[in-house]
Image: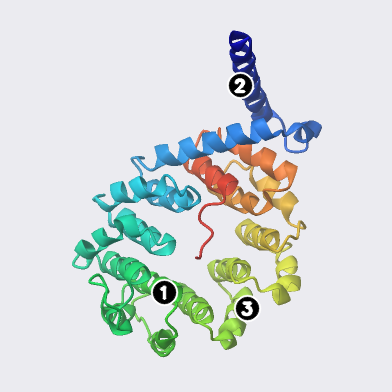
Amino acid sequence: MQLQMDVRMIRTRCMTWMLLIIFTLLPASSAWSQVLTADIYQAAQNRAVQQILVSARSEDRILRANALEAAEALPNRIGPLVQQALMDPQEVVRYAALVTIGKLKISGVATNARQYLNDPSMSVRAAAIFALARNFGTASSHNNSGWAVDISPLADMLMSQNPTTRGNVVYLMGLMGDASAIPLLKMAAHDRMPSVPHSREVIIRIQIAEAIYRLGDVEVLDSIRAGMFSQFDEVRILSAQMTGRLYDRQWEPAIEIALKKDPIELKLAAAGTLGRFGNRHGLDIILDAAQSRSAMLRSQAAICLGMFRNVPPATQMLIGLLTDQVESVRLAAAAGLLGGGRDGL
């Protein structure tokens, strides 16, 4: 009897994997989407987990960093991944590891963040402060933890003339939850960066507005909305994405209009934001982009499809993208399927 049961289990698993393989070959419009079973979905999730683990050791530093963000959906795996990433020679990976420790409050490895307070990279130092503050509090909060951290160095980092550093510090201050940072952020918004392209300077100001909004000052919401009318494509795209992250449904009609405006990256950003709202009007745009010749567009489409995970055609396409020939697309599909990396706490 036991042997018969084992044989049936093996046959069931083989059939599930066979269906999963066939499933990835069918077009998104196929009625095959109706056969998306719990077994197929579980097999796809397992494959997504494996992709994240593989990408965490990729030769590409950006993929290693992105894998950490995707792994936010894997609470039982994230600890060893961030420990590995903390020793990475690339600052973008160390930064991602420390941010993840802070966002998820991974106290088991958070004590290791203190050694990065003197890291050569200013962004990494800022992320170390963030990780310690989120897990153990700040020196000014009068707690008795021996791991409490002084966050005052962030004020100088915020005024860095390096746009990447300033943008990273702005992001971290927005997530830290300390409303006393609002005046500093407003000061940074008026601090010019003469050597930085104007479009990048505008992006940083929009990022500052998002951070201030997260800290409780809702008056800056109009600044984020205004970004939808910027002369710069990248600003309009970022504004559309922020509208979704901040769940600004009052701006939903403007986002729907953006579905009809070029470039395609803006349409995808708008469609993804609508997906966060439960609005499916942009789903066809995403499904088309998921079949683009451009790996970058397929990756962006995969992330957007993650906002429609309860919609069979979207899930079917995500499962298909798990077998894409480009690793960045496979990783984006894994993140989309599992729900990791949603830009916030």
Q: Nearer the viewer, residue 9 or 262?
A: 9
Q: CA distance from mark 2 to mark 1?
A: 45 Å
Q: Is residue 160 visible?
A: no
Marks 1, 3: nearer the viewer = 1
Task: Give residue 176's mark.
Answer: 1
Q: CA distance from mark 3 to mark 2?
A: 49 Å
Location of residue 332 in the rendering, given as x and y in whole percent from the top left corner: 53, 46
Q: Is residue 316 visible?
A: yes
Residue drawn at 69 percent across, 58 percent down: 275
Residue wearing tag 2: 13
Residue drawn at 34 percent across, 70 percent down: 130
Mark 1 vs 3, N-terminal side: 1
Q: Label 1 sits on what residue type? A: Met
Left/right placement of residue 111 relative to residue 43 reads: left
Q: Label 3 sits on what residue type? A: Arg
Residue wearing tag 3: 225
